[in-house]
Structure formats: structure tokens, C-alpha cells
Image (spheres, grey):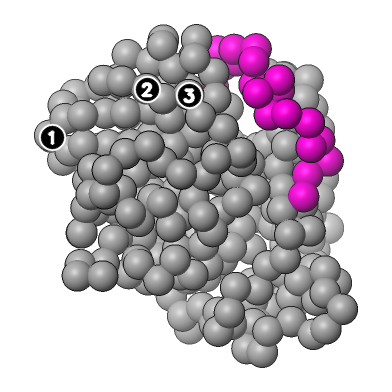
Amino acid sequence: MIDPPKKMRPALLALIAASRSSSPAAGFSPASLLWSPSSSSSSSSSWTNNNIRPSSRSSSFVVPTPRRPPTRMLATMKDLAEGVLRNPRYPPEWPYSPIDFERQDESDDSLFYSRPRLVYHIDEYAVAALTGYYARNFEDGDDVLDVCSSWVSHYPDDWRGGNVVGLGMNERELGMNGRLSSYVVRDLNVDPTLPFPDGSFDTVTIVVSVDYLNRPREVFDEIARVLRPGGACHVSMSNRCFPTKAFRIWLRTNDLEHIFMVGSFFHYSGKFEPATCEDISPNPGRSDPMYVVKATRRRGG
């Protein structure tokens, strides 16, 4: 169990409780793990998701106003991020309700994603950090599925994959991705099934997109199904998003709570080993943060 600072907030607990007429599942206590920088000091409040400004890359994409947190807090933040999933206390049953996954814009996602966005959705330092992470975790010959894929997957240039498949929303973007062997256009919010046989892949990746999946329980069950035993799913996340398409509970929680949430998605599938988190943020406070939550498909189950 990590030893977080004294000031914490029970954000997920409060949100889940508010979405029900009855109390939340017993034992659900993310507050014992999570700390919000916004509750600590004014000098760090700008690096939560509560203070955002328009990104220069897209009028609908948002990113926190960059202010460097105090040096003494950098190591603490990394320790906290990587400690969130070391001993999480999940409730016995799935604690989320449909309202948690509602979005500001419930119009057809195919309309929103019909226009190609040939930009990086994280800055170049975060891209480099993610590519370096993949270089440490991929093996040549791996069959890989990139969920919520686009025109770039950030895989290492010198990595030689096997069958590399992208599944995304925009055919033009997918067609421009030179790392893919093939691709499938599918809206997982309409049909959360993955059109592949059981045990098709060694690795699954999701890059800064898990917050758009409003049926995560079904999607993570499908990820487990298409992964080979011992295969891994890597879910990377930052603090940028299209706020009108991100689900409600994501927008109202912070980075540490996002880590906890994604860990819970793996947990409730019942088919993964306990998830872990690696904070690969390249320049804390000066560039986009990057966290990867990873879980391995259980063998024999």
C-alpha cells in the first residue's frame, strides 16, 4: 500500500454514490489510494484536469495550462501514479452505472470522426516516451491489435511486428498508417465486439482513447478474448481529450483516478492478472504526462 499525502478526495466514491439512489458497493475506497494535487496547494492546482485551455492543435481538444509543479512533488507524483494499482480495493461488483458513461455529445460518433485528424494527440516528448515504452515491451514477430487506431500508432521504427491490425473510426487515417498489416473500421460504442477469433494477438494497445469507450466492460472482455494467454494489453493515457466525447466520470476525475479506473476495467473482466501502472511522463510539468496501465491475460482462464 502506498503512503499518500494526508489531503485526498474520494472523487470516484462520490460520483458513483451520486449516480445511485442507494449507497455504493461496500469496500470501494479509492480515496485511500488517491490524492488530488488541487486539494493540496494553489501552486499545483493547474496540473489537474480541472483547469484547461484550448490546445493549439485543435479547437475541440483541451489540455491543462502548463505550470511546472514544485520539484519536491515530481518524485511524489510518480510514486503515487505507480502505486495506485499496487494494492487497490475494488468492490465485489461492478460499481459503475450507465450515467457514468454518458457524454456531452451523444450524437453518432461516425459523424464526429468522419473528418481525418492527421495530428498527434499528445506532444512530441510524450510520443517519444510512448515509443520507448513499446520498444521495451514489444517482441519482434508479435501479432498486435491497435484499438482506437488512427494514422499513427507510435510503434518503434525498428520493431518488426507480425500481423499488426488497426481498429478505428476513420478509414482514411487507418489507410495512412504504414505500421498496419490491415485495418477494420468499427465503432465500439455501437458494437463492442472485436471481429477476430479467440487468441489472435500477443499484444493489444489503446493510445489516449480509453476515455471515449462508453462500454468498457464489454470491450475489455473482448480484449481478453482475442489475446493469447500471457499476452498483454497496454492502455496509455495523458490529460488531453475531446471533452464532448469523453465519458462523464472521466471528465470529473484526475489522472490518478483514471489509473485506478482503467485498472478496474481489467479487474472486472476476471481474465487478467492484476494491472500495473508505469509513469513514463518525459518532462513532468513541462510536457504532456503519460501513464501506461498494463495487464497480462491469465493463462488457463
Q: Quadrant of residue 18?
A: bottom right
Give amino acid for label 1. Asp
- Which residue lies at the image location 53% right of the left edge and 67% below the top edge? 264
Q: Residue furthest bottom?
A: 26
Rounded to the nearest whole Å, what is the CA distance between mark 3 and mark 2?
7 Å
Structural crowding at the residue carrying mark 3, measured as other residues with C-alpha within 10 Å and reported as few (<14), some (14–19) or many (≥20): some
Give amino acid for label 3. Val
**Residue 140 located left or right of residue 47:** left
Mark 3 or mark 1, whichever is nearer to me: 3
Task: Give the labeled residue for mark 1.
Answer: 140
- Which residue lies at the image location 43% right of the left edge and 75% below the top edge? 86
Q: How many marks?
A: 3
Q: Is residue 91 placed above or below 172 in the rendered structure?
A: below
Rounded to the nearest whole Å, what is the CA distance between mark 3 and mark 1?
26 Å
Question: Percent from the top left, x then y, of residue 177?
Answer: 38, 15
Whether residue 114 appears in magenta in the rendering, the answer is: yes
Foreground of the two, 110 or 254: 110
> Is the magenta region chiefly helix, strand or loop?
loop
Rounded to the nearest whole Å, what is the CA distance between mark 1 and mark 2?
20 Å
Question: Percent from the top left, x then y, of residue 292?
Answer: 44, 51
Stretch in magenta? 102-120
- Which residue lies at the image location 64% right of the left edge and 82% below the top edge? 28
Question: Percent from the top left, x then y, of residue 3?
Answer: 55, 82
Question: Percent from the top left, x then y, of residue 91?
Answer: 59, 82
Whether residue 152 appears in magenta in the rendering, the answer is: no
3 or 1: tag closer to the N-terminus: 1
- Which residue lies at the image location 78% right of the left edge and 44% below the top edge? 103
Task: Give the labeled residue for mark 2.
Answer: 183
Structural crowding at the residue carrying mark 2, measured as other residues with C-alpha within 10 Å and reported as few (<14), some (14–19) or many (≥20): some
Q: Is residue 119 placed above or below 5 in the rendered structure?
A: above
Residue 185 is marked as: 3
